[in-house]
Amino acid sequence: EAMAKGSLVERLVIILEETGSGKSTILRRVAFDLAASGYVVLECTPLSRLDAQSTAEALDLIDEPLVVIVDDFAEQASSISNVMAALEKKDVVFVCAERSYRERHILRSLGDIPRRIVSGLSLNQTEAFQLVQSYVQRGMTASQTAIKFPARFASDLVDEPIAVACCHILND
């Protein structure tokens, strides 16, 4: 939204959360939604370290606003930091995800690059209830409690990562 308004401050958004919280799913949804809105979206999945200069030069050739999606960001934090420093293009946003225990490494790698960190992806009561209902409607739960008392079952899922909640719904 900030990029579309021309008020982009942070060119780096990092989702830091625990395993199973839905980070990768969110990245893919962001990529899909932005691409559907007409943005150029690239996914960075290098097999080795990025060459910062070559990568920056390639990105600079893209005329439209650009979003780069990076999962498992800690592996590429230093390289992405170098790419960002080498970029001439200003309408590029990197949206990244990593497990929260790697935050210290990431912050050291990034130095003073402005960034926005997003966390707090655990389920609230409404989300947990909607998730339980969705599974029940599709016949995908073996739990009689989830079927008969979905609100009560959902309250036990509050503050759980979504992957853990899904396992409880499927297997409880």
Image (tube, rainbow, N blue to C red):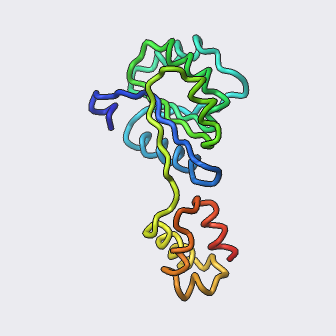
Q: Quadrant of the C terminus?
A: bottom right
Compared with residue 20, is residue 86 higher up or lower down, i.e. above or below?
above
- Count how many numbered circles sit on residues in the image: 0
Nearest to the observer: residue 61 or residue 158 = 158
Report the residue at 29% width, 28% height from top: 7
Compared with residue 138, is residue 167 higher up or lower down, i.e. above or below?
above
**Is 45 positioned to the left or the right of 110 in the image?**
right
Residue 132: % across, % down: 53, 74
Residue most toward the right? 48
Residue 158: % across, % down: 52, 67
Residue 133: % across, % down: 50, 76
**Is 150 positioned to the left or the right of 51 in the image?**
left
Nearest to the observer: residue 130 or residue 28 = 130
Report the residue at 39% width, 19% height from top: 90
Report the residue at 28% width, 27% height from top: 6
Q: Quadrant of residue 44?
A: top right
Nearest to the observer: residue 60 or residue 162 = 162
Q: Quadrant of residue 73?
A: top right
Residue 18: % across, % down: 61, 49
Report the residue at 49% width, 51% height from top: 120
Q: Quadrant of the N terminus?
A: top left
Compared with residue 76, is residue 144 higher up or lower down, i.e. above or below?
below
